Image: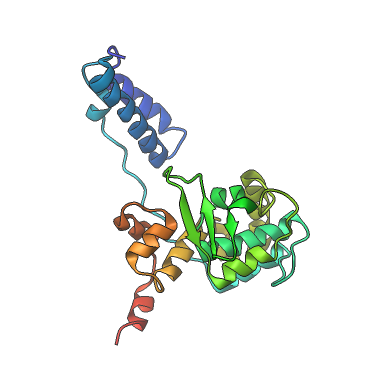
Amino acid sequence: MDTITSDHIKKWRDNELKRVANSTVNRDLNFLSAVFEESRREWKYCNINPVRETKRPKNPRPRDRLIAGEEIEAILNELNYREGEEPKTITPRIGTAFLFAIETAMRAGEICRLTWDNVFLDRRYVRLDITKNGDPRNVPLSSRAKMLLETLPRDGDLCFGFSNSTRDTLFRRARRRASSALPSIKTLKFHDTRHEAITRLARKLDVLDLARMIGHRDPKSLMIYYNATATDIASRLD
């Protein structure tokens, strides 16, 4: 490790930027920096951290995409979702997951991994043991989120009964079909449900409760996802 210099890291950075996004490179640089720092301080494998001398690429602006009501309706129609009905197949279950994401701000992977033994409908919360930041958390359920779970059949350990890759494939197909009549939906991503959910929840919860619910250690990071428009804010002013 002591032979690796900042020139090596810069060359790796430039090669990676040709194939992946700036934000991905930055996450990998954070990981590499942590490894070198631990090696320098604890293990004495190297004398410097070469990542510290490497310029980071600029991250793109965070997405601020909210979801219009007509877009929600169009996606649900293409997924054959019917309000209040038990989803018999995988496709309408993805519609249920889409609505559940808007209610809870849970990530797609968290929803796909959710198991019935971590669902506590009587106390209105679900338990997430595996999250992006590594901290388990309890997610409170709105009345609608609770209702959505209650419509799901209990025919396996997984609540929604599909993998994240299946969710991605079928959601993309539904979006493509919907886009013929509604072109704006072409830019919609499943993860935009998190922006939509947090913007809605911010009207109901104080900032600390909201950060706890969605698993952010630093409340400042909520600004990445909170996307209320000036008109929305103005409507709440006297």
- Residue 144 located left or right of residue 54: right
Would residue 203 appear left or right of 43 to someone viewing this image? right
Residue at horizontal 37 percent and vertical 59 percent from the top = 211
45 vs 176, nearest the viewer = 45
Query: Position of 13 compared to 187: left or right?
Result: left
Residue 176 seen in the current view: yes
Which color scheme is applied? rainbow
Q: Nearer the viewer, residue 107 or 234?
A: 107
User: x, y (%) of residue 4?
Assistant: 30, 16
Residue found farthest to the top: 3
Residue 28 position in % (x across, y down):
39, 33
Q: In this view, does 78 lie above or below 39?
A: below
Instruction: Please identify the quadrant where the C terminus is shown.
Output: bottom left
Count of number-bearing discs: 0
Q: Residue at the spot x=40%, y=73% of the render?
A: 203
Residue 65 location, x and y as percent? 46, 62
Compared with 149, 115 (above or below) is above
Q: Residue 69 is drawn in which quadrant?
A: bottom right
Considering depth in this image, is 16 or 114 the residue closer to the camera?
A: 114
**Residue at image coords 34%, 32%:** 29
The residue sitting at 63% across, 69% down in the picture is 147
Q: Looking at the figure, which quarter contains the N terminus? A: top left
